[in-house]
Structures are given as structure tokens and as C-alpha cells.
Amino acid sequence: MKMLATIVTTTTLLLAQTASASAAVDALLDEYRAAGAGPFSAEAGQRMWSETYLNSNAPTERRCNSCHTNNLAVSGKHAKTQKTIKPLAPSANAKRLSDTKMIVKWFKRNCKWTLGRECTPQEKGDFLLHIQN
Ligand code: HEC
């Protein structure tokens, strides 16, 4: 129980300290909050990142890491086209999460491909915190 309390406290502190990587992320998080979402959690984003969603099209099992891998600091590979995708982590690729238009566009496409629907503001906020970590 004490262990659990320590974990909870540590997590809360970490979340409280989460500073956004960029003005673009800040702007989007504000937008999602205005839509009623939040607080956001990098842990929830990480969980969803490797969650499997089923789809009737091929590949039938779809995850964010189908194309981006679990290590955001390394390049991924597109599950269908096999094209290399540069790392998503801003620490490894400074262009990432710097342009709201890019983020909005790719969230739309990738959520539809992976989950079969658009992500909710809560999910997008959680994903952003996970990716910028
Ligand atoms: C079918 C392959 C594929 C899957 C699955 C996928 N992505 Fe992507 N994603 C891409 C490609 C391709 C790009 C853009 C390529 C580039 O900029 O190098 C991209 C770009 C992004 C970006 C833009 C980042 C930026 O600032 O440039 C975000 C955010 C993102 N993906 C999040 C996600 C999330 C969240 C999921 C799971 C819901 C996901 N992706 C699943 C292929 C995929």
C-alpha cells in the first residue's frame, strides 16, 4: 500500500511538472481543454500507443506502433508502404510537434487508420504528452 502511495505521488509530481515541448502542443492542449478534455496523462498515451485495435481491412491488427515502433526516438516503418518514418520524439527530430497543422492532419489520418475513428480531444492530449516525453 505504501508502495502504491509512493507511485501515485511520484506520478502526480511528474504530471504536474510536464512542460510542453512546443507552442504548437500548448495551443492544441488549450483547444482540447476548451472542448472539456483534461487533465492529460502521458501514461494513458503510452498505454494507447501499444493498444491493438481490430479492423476488417488488412493489416487487421492496428496499433500506433505498427508504423512508429514503441521507441519514439528511432525511425519507424509504414505498415503498408514499408516507407521509413522519421522518429516522432521531438528530442530526436526537432521538427516534430512544432506545427499544429501537421499534428492535426496526422492525428486525423492515423486515428482513423488505427482506431477506425477520429481520436477524442482527451486521447489526442494524452498522445501528445506521451510523444513529447
Ligand atoms: C499506417 C502507418 C501509421 C500508423 C499506424 C500511425 N501513424 Fe502516425 N504517422 C504516419 C506517417 C506516415 C506520418 C508522417 C510522416 C512523417 O512526417 O515523416 C505520421 C505522423 C504522425 C504525427 C505527426 C507528428 C509531427 O509533428 O510531425 C503524429 C502526432 C502521429 N503520427 C501520431 C500517431 C498516433 C497517435 C498513432 C496511433 C493512433 C499513429 N500516429 C499511427 C504513419 C502512421
Image (cartoon, rainbow, N blue to C red):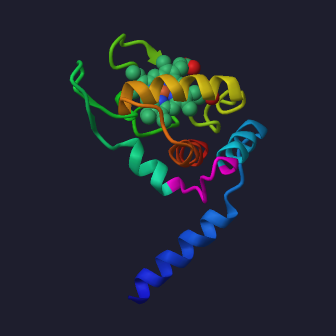
Is residue 106 covered in magenta? Answer: no
Look at 47% across and 76% down and name the residue there: 7
In screen coordinates, is 81 left or right of 39?
Answer: left
Is residue 85 visible in this depiction of the protein? Answer: no
Q: Position of residue 22 (x, y in %)?
A: 75, 40
Q: Quarter of the image for the N terminus: give it.
A: bottom left
Q: Where is 68 relative to 7, above or below? A: above
Look at 48% across and 22% down and name the residue there: 109
In screen coordinates, is 16 left or right of 108?
Answer: right
Look at 39% across and 18% down and name the residue there: 78
* Residue at the far right in the pictured view: 23
Q: Where is 47 relative to 96, above or below? A: below
Q: Position of residue 23 (x, y in %)?
A: 78, 39
Q: Position of residue 19 (x, y in %)?
A: 72, 54
Residue sitting nearer the eye, 68 or 129? 129
In screen coordinates, is 23 left or right of 86?
Answer: right
Please provide the residue range marked out in magenta: 33-42
Main SS of the magenta segment? loop
Is residue 89 visible in this depiction of the protein? Answer: yes
Residue 81, quarter of the rendered image: top left
Residue 88, quarter of the rendered image: top right
Q: Position of residue 106 (x, y in %)?
A: 55, 24
